[in-house]
Image (spheres, helix red, strand yellow):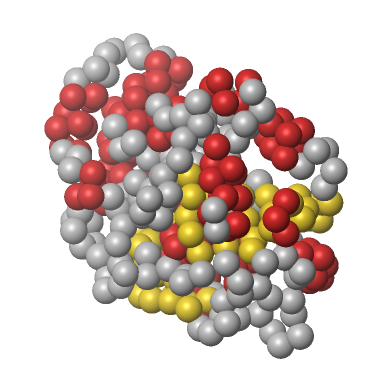
Amino acid sequence: MKHLLSFLSAILVTLTFASCHPYEEWDDSAEGNFDALWTILDEHYCFFDEKDIDWNEVGQRYRARLVPGITQQELFVLCAEMIDELEDGHTNLISPFDISYYDQWWTDYPQDFDIRVLQEHYLGFDYKVSSGIYYKIMPNNIGYIYYPSFSSTIGEGNLDWILADLAVCDALIIDIRDNGGGQLTNIETFLRRFIHEPTLAGYIRHKTGPGHDQFSEPYPFYYYPAEVGRMTWHKPIALLINRSCFSAANNFAAIMKSLPNVTLIGSRTGGGGGMPFSAELPNGWGIRFSACPITDSLDRQIETGVDPTEGCEVHSLPQDFVLGIDPILDFALSHLSGQ
């Protein structure tokens, strides 16, 4: 993982130096800022081909809407609508007065999770918490872990306590529903407890030129087991996912799916398979965008999400939650109990 982070740092330096020189050519005008935004994305965004986006057509269509006297707020809305065409939750326009965000990657799908139903009807408001992780032994001697955000750092000692407490269980549920992502380092710390040999996690590429198809060769990256003496888990695991698993959580789901003792249950994750980087427009606005695609261990793209294991797609209806029922969690409990 350290090699991956060093590799990403080198990419960031390359991207910054390759991109900052042309910025000076654009005026701090509506047209100049628009053209700067369009060009930065044209040369560095990484999913045009996968999403079959004609960026020239998009740019012409939105530039035609620039009118004399357009205000900063109106320009922001116009630019935000343009980058929404990328359908990418990692791509944001940042101004002093607003931040654009494409949310249809999850709003057009069922939520498939209700934290109150989980806490009240399954955990009985009686569970332990360590570094933001909920855990408990559930019926049929099944351990349960809920990790709501990979922004919450988990310590090695915390994981030792959690897994020691659950060691008596025959199987484990890891629930990352509604986990919007966070730090790759937190994925590493967590995932190392569930592997017992060096594991190919996936591949990463970076842009080598301004063309939409100009990328480096895929660079493999690996995760390694926790140090000897740490608590680990090698019994069956059910990983619960929904559409609101994004970015780092999406990556975690992809890696876990490659492990032989893991079953993914729920609905397709929200995606977010590109490493985001940032640049600046002449007026000081920031643009954050996907610059380096990450693929899974079979070099398949995960930008649009990771599917549950075949036969394990489960959804929840609103009336289920009204009745205090979580069909995804019920399916996992039944699956791990052999029923």
Q: Is residue 87 left or right of residue 253?
A: left
Q: Quadrant of residue 172?
A: bottom right
Q: Quadrant of residue 211?
A: bottom left
Residue 148 visible from this viewpoint: yes
* Closer-to-camera residue (321/339): 339
Q: Position of residue 120 (x, y in %)?
A: 76, 33
Q: Is residue 317 left or right of residue 39?
A: right
The residue at the point 65 percent across, 73 percent down is 233
Q: Is residue 110 left or right of residue 295?
A: right
The residue at the point 57 percent across, 26 percent down is 320
* Closer-to-camera residue (232/13): 232
Residue 18 visible from this viewpoint: no
* Closer-to-camera residue (266/99): 266
Instruction: State the count of labels.
Output: 0
Q: Quadrant of the N terminus?
A: bottom right
Q: Position of residue 83 (x, y in %)?
A: 34, 33
Q: Quadrant of residue 302?
A: bottom left
* Closer-to-camera residue (325/226): 325
Q: Residue furthest front?
A: 339
The residue at the point 28 percent across, 50 percent down is 47
The residue at the point 60 percent across, 35 percent down is 326
Q: Position of residue 215 (x, y in %)?
A: 25, 65
Q: Position of residue 72 (x, y in %)?
A: 44, 20
Q: Is residue 324 above or below residue 172?
A: above
Q: Residue furthest bottom?
A: 228
